[in-house]
Image: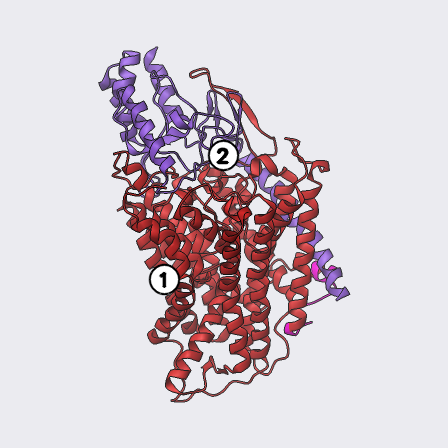
Chain colours: A red, B purple
């Protein structure tokens, strides 16, 4: 009953967000929102640009790549010299080079994979100046790419697709900052910590325990961590810790925040191309898959944990190993699916201790390519790539030139879409094969048997999809995993973004073909089914052999332990 | 190319100042003014309400098994109510990360069942599993109820009084449906200490 009400509230809240945040975002990127003009204009002056100076897709991509490289450099340098910087009450030393590379790549690519324990590794300066900054910047970059691609559909005979600097500035100030700040206040009000005063030690006279507990500017980082589908928390155990995620309400708020922008962007898309119905079609495909995944994962987590049941303790409240009492099994499963299907990767439990099918829900949620609804921006643009492929396949079946929103989909777009769709599976599978072939890779997992393989596969799937959640038993802080993980994240981000911008540029240059009776409909239930089919074939079938060796074997090996 | 680089450096600097320091400092300022108690970590006389502690004596209600039996606090073993340092052991927040078909998890659970049976308690699921944070401050009302024989025997307080205490200390799920109902173990034991007086 409680879970049903949770879902109902979530659906209502997200429905309103979809409609109103969606149209607000369209207004922001169309340049119709100005209330922060006094901040916006000086920034454009300092940058030497203006909304009127539009960029071709190549210049847009160039600005994006160089800005991301500079962001990685800034983050890397701060981590490497944090020992000499202020705001370091615990006197933590500099972060090593391989770990700094992995971490800076991770936060700039919106992955937030963490090979470190936050409270014992990162100074307040690093948490604020290196990590939180990128939690704002990386979603803004992702959303900018999605908007640039949408302009490709919306414009006719245009050489340009917008201005990268203007798009990220508007996204940062008009969308991310105000929502994150309000959410941050709620987090702290519920009990999330927000102080610069360092650790606190106390003595409990009742039981004689002396505890030192870590504190920091956590609550406001938490807000942008969820809103920007980042996922990298201040503390090692992320949203499971009461200092990051203290109550049932903050758990719900986290789920709401991380789903809000990715879903709402489909409305923004519809609004900008002049057909909200097309946005709703993509939304329907996202929601259907998301709902199925929530259903079977929550059901799996409501079962007994096999290893605990083997000790003859049976649970009326589901698998509680690695879960927190205040959240319970089904809310934790909802959080997990929301987090893995949005490329967020925050965790309010130990995902490693999920039941085999529950763990499969999280892992396969990422393997679908992070489109249901996917990350901030990355979800929409990857979904549009799948939509283009669906249009192409649909067009082939009925023998017509494929069109989407009046734009002819031709060889160039299909090649680029194919590239964008295949980069992630190839990267993930090749790197997983590499890791299990080498002794340094096999040394990583804590668990034995199929679950050990799942830990490696999960880690590389998560980084390749810029998710950042983990089966935490994998020891990732080794030079091998730091470096292949870094490569995984860079390819999963930029080797998709660049073809996506190229598609945007190529579509913007085309004129619109008038709709005729023969046009293949892309705004009805049939198309929803087609898109879902493409997602399941690319994500599901590509990874099926790998999944069979991990969670499926684990589920089927009845009464065997490893 | 150079113009991209110059703009990137300027933008990165603006973001460092605005979305790093202005955001975090303004947030901390607002938090400290509006919600000082929460922002400082919900710390009361005997510790933080949000951080689990190790209650090993049968005189007290115990929390999750994060620091019990096979998971007893140590610097190498994951688990342990070890937010940073507890009773001299270094640590950080950690879960066991043991998989659902792990022999180690099976063995640890069996060891915990024996541990509880020795205390005269028929353990519930939360009492033989570890949490996600490694220091879950809460247990369910059922987890507290099964510990009544143990606490009653050690303290001499009647089971009826303990049951009343548990009912009084049970927080319902937030807004009636968000998350689960729970009991804060520190508050429960503070209530117990008052009964003892």
Measured Cα–Cα span from mark 1 to mark 2: 33 Å
Q: Please tell me which residue is depicted at 35% across the width and 24% down the height of the picture.
A: B62
Q: Mainly helix, strand or loop, the magenta region?
A: loop
Q: Is residue A540 shown in magenta?
A: no
Question: The numbered mark 2 sits on a residue in which chain?
Answer: B
Classify residue A483 as left or right of residue A15: right
Q: Secondary structure at mark 1?
A: helix
- Quick one: A29 or A536, which is closer to the camera? A536
Visible in this render: residue B170? Answer: no
Q: Residue furthest left?
A: B160
Classify residue B31 as left or right of residue B66: right
Q: Quadrant of residue A315?
A: top left
Q: Is residue A359 above or below residue A538?
A: above
Image x and y of residue A487, in percent: 59, 56
Q: Please tell me which residue is depicted at 44% across the width and 86% down the height of the picture.
A: A515
Image x and y of residue A551, in percent: 37, 51
Question: The numbered mark 1 sits on a residue in which chain?
Answer: A
Classify residue A520 as left or right of residue A426: left
The image's mark for residue B93 is 2
Extent of the magenta region: A43-57
The image's mark for residue A391 is none
- Do callouts 1 and 2 point to residues on the same chain? no
- Quick one: B157 or B104, which is closer to the camera? B104
Q: Please tell me which residue is depicted at 38% across the width and 89% down the height of the picture.
A: A517
Q: Is residue B67 above or below residue A271?
A: above
Look at the numbered discs 1 and 2 and tell me whether their residues touch, using CB distance below 8 Å.
no
Residue annotated with mark 1: A289
Q: Is residue A46 shown in magenta?
A: yes
Q: Secondary structure at mark 2?
A: loop
Local crowd size for mark 1, using a 10 Å CA cut-off: few (<14), some (14–19), many (≥20): many
Visible in this render: residue B147? Answer: yes
């Amino acid at each position: 009953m409680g879970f049903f009400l949770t879902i109902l509230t979530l659906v209502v809240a997200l429905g309103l967000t979809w409609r109103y945040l969606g149209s607000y975002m369209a207004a922001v990127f169309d340049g119709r929102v100005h209330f922060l003009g006094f901040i916006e204009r000086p920034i454009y002056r300092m940058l030497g640009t203006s909304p009127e100076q539009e960029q071709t897709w190549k210049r847009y991509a160039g600005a994006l790549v160089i800005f991301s490289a500079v962001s990685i450099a800034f983050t890397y340098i701060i981590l490497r010299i944090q020992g000499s910087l202020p705001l370091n009450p615990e006197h933590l030393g500099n972060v090593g080079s391989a770990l700094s590379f992995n971490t800076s790549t991770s936060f700039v690519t919106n992955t937030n994979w963490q090979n470190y324990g936050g409270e014992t590794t990162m100074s307040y300066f690093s948490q604020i100046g290196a990590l939180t900054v990128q939690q704002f910047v990386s979603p803004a970059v992702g959303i900018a790419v999605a908007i640039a691609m949408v302009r490709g559909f919306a414009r006719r005979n245009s050489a340009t697709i917008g201005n990268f600097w203007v798009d990220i500035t508007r996204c940062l100030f008009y969308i991310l900052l105000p929502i994150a700040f309000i959410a941050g206040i709620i987090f702290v009000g519920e009990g999330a910590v927000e102080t610069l005063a360092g650790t606190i030690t106390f003595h409990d006279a009742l039981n004689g325990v002396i505890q030192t507990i870590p504190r920091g500017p956590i609550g406001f980082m938490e807000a942008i961590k969820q809103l920007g589908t980042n996922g990298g928390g201040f503390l090692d155990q992320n949203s499971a810790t009461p200092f990051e995620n203290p109550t049932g309400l903050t758990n719900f708020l986290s789920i709401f925040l991380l789903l809000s922008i990715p879903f709402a962007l489909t409305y923004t898309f519809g609004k900008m191309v002049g057909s909200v119905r097309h946005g709703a079609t993509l939304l329907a495909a996202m929601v259907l898959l998301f709902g199925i995944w929530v259903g079977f994962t929550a059901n799996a987590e409501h079962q007994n944990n096999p290893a605990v049941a083997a000790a003859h303790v049976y649970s009326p409240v589901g698998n509680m190993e690695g879960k927190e009492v205040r959240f319970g099994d089904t809310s934790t499963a909802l959080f997990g699916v929301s987090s893995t299907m949005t490329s967020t990767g925050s965790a309010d439990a130990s995902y490693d201790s999920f039941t085999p099918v529950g763990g499969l829900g999280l892992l396969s949620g990422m393997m679908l390519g992070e489109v249901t609804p996917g990350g901030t921006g990355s979800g929409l643009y990857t979904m549009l790539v799948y939509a283009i492929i669906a249009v192409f396949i649909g067009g082939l079946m009925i023998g017509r030139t494929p069109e989407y929103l009046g734009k002819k989909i031709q060889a160039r777009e299909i090649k680029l879409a194919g590239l964008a769709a295949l980069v992630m599976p190839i990267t993930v599978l090749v790197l997983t094969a590499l890791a299990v072939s080498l002794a340094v890779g096999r040394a990583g997992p804590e668990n034995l048997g199929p679950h050990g393989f799942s830990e490696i596969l999960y880690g590389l799937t998560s980084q390749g999809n810029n998710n950042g959640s983990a089966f935490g038993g994998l020891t990732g802080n080794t030079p091998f995993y730091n470096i292949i993980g870094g490569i995984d994240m860079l390819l999963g981000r930029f080797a998709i973004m660049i073809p996506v911008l190229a598609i945007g540029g190529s579509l913007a240059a085309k004129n619109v073909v008038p709709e005729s009776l023969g046009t293949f409909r892309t705004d009805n239930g049939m198309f929803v089914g087609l898109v879902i089919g493409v997602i399941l074939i690319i994500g599901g079938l590509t990874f099926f052999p790998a999944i069979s060796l991990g969670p499926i074997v684990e589920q089927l090996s009845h009464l065997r332990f490893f | 190319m150079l113009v991209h680089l110059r703009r990137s450096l300027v933008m990165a600097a603006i973001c460092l100042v605005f979305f790093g320091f202005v955001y975090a400092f303004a947030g901390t300022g607002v938090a400290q003014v509006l919600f000082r108690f929460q922002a400082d970590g919900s710390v009361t006389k005997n510790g933080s309400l949000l951080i689990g502690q190790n209650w090993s004596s049968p005189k007290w209600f115990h929390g999750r098994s994060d620091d019990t039996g096979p998971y007893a606090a140590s610097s190498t073993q994951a688990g342990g109510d070890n937010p940073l340092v507890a009773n001299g052991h270094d640590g950080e927040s950690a879960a066991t990360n043991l998989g659902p078909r792990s022999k180690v998890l099976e063995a640890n659970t069996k060891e915990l069942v024996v541990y509880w049976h020795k205390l005269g308690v028929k353990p519930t699921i939360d009492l033989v599993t570890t949490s996600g944070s490694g220091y879950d401050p809460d247990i369910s009302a059922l987890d507290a109820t099964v510990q009544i024989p143990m606490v009653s025997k050690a303290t001499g307080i009647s089971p009826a009084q303990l049951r009343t205490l548990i009912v009084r200390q049970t927080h319902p799920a937030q807004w009636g449906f968000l998350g689960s109902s729970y009991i804060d173990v520190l508050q429960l034991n503070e209530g117990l200490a008052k009964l003892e007086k």
